[in-house]
Image: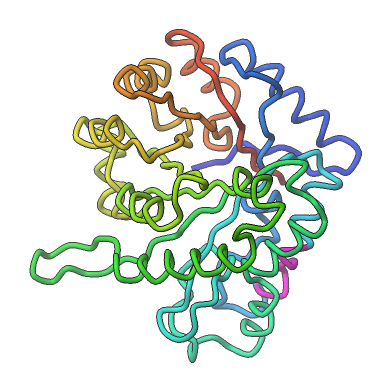
Amino acid sequence: MKKYTIVRSVHQTGSFLKEEWDFLSAFVDSPGQPFFMGHRLGDYRHYPMHFRKEKEIRRYKSVVQLMREAFLYFGLTGVEFDIRLFLRGDETIYITHDPLGYPEEAGSLAREYLQAATLELLLDTYIKEKFYEMGPLGIELKSQPIFRGERGYFSHDMQYMGRMISALKSLLDRMVGRSRLAKKIRPRLLFASFDLLTLERLAEALGPEYSCYLILTAEDKLLGGLGKMVYHNDPLWQKQKDRIARADFLRGVWFDPAFMARPAQTLGLFSARRQRPLEIYLSTYYSGRDLLRERLSRGPRFPIHGLFFELD
């Protein structure tokens, strides 16, 4: 799908983001100015996607540089990124989009880049340079598909996700723990996944001090079915809606109106069945203004906490 992007410019991006919010505020509410979140650390062209080709790796910027640019130069007040583990070996958490595979499959250039692309290094910089005073980190736990031969389909590898959750808990206990800054940092770490079971297990491991957000998939029968087949994610059909309504551990949801015909109606039904309303983060980069206007105007206004943007 074609993406709707915002121009990356040291002098103009902040104004462009404000203009987008001025447009969206005709359809949604916010208790204050929402967080302006940069998808893929606010620079998808230089974000680590995969490590199959050396030419691609040489194009990537360091994840710390991407975060600094996002917060300091491009008017963003939050960033989103993906985390993964190798399929075997140590439990170091890396920032990258595509699966890492096995350690021995990584070339020397990939290994060199990954040494400086760890969640530990990024989080250390985020804390030391006090970026938590500016906004949150949206941390997506990327799943690992596994083939269920006895059933003939792929699904999420929950053993892999268990390793990820264990590694996350160990890292957070060590870096945040009960430090004097813990109360400031924990609310700024937003953990997200397309998989509700992963988030339930994460919430059990980390406790209520950390926030879990479900990334919503497509409501449409065709798109939802394709998403299930290709990405192994549960579509936003009635069964999944019922699960979300019962998931008290969820703090909120992230969604793009491109995949939801009547967002206000669907989100309103969730909130009506829950003791605590969901915090809503809205993505813009698969919609564009025309589609956002069409979808968001169908129904009552609803509150949002943040907006995800793709910067080009």
Residue 20 screen position, x and y as percent: 70, 24
Q: Nearer the viewer, residue 180 or 205?
A: 180
Residue 291 screen position, x and y as percent: 51, 22
Q: Nearer the viewer, residue 35 or 112?
A: 35
Identify the residue at horizontal 65%, vertical 42% (top origin). 310
Residue 181 screen position, x and y as percent: 71, 52
Q: Nearer the viewer, residue 292 or 121?
A: 121
Chief secondary structure of the magenta span? helix
Q: Is residue 133 left or right of residue 224?
A: right
Q: Residue furthest right?
A: 11
Q: Is residue 19 left or right of residue 221?
A: right
On whether residue 62 falls in the magenta region, the answer is yes
Image position of 103 with respect to 18: above or below: below
Q: Is residue 193 left or right of residue 229?
A: right
Q: Which residues are magenta?
A: 57-64
Identify the residue at horizontal 29%, vertical 30% (top origin). 245
Image position of 312 with respect to 144: above or below: above
Number of marks in picture: 0
Q: Is residue 156 left or right of residue 69?
A: left
Q: Residue furthest left?
A: 150
Name the image quarter holding residue 82.
bottom right
Residue 129 screen position, x and y as percent: 82, 56
Identify the residue at horizontal 13%, vertical 71% (top origin). 149
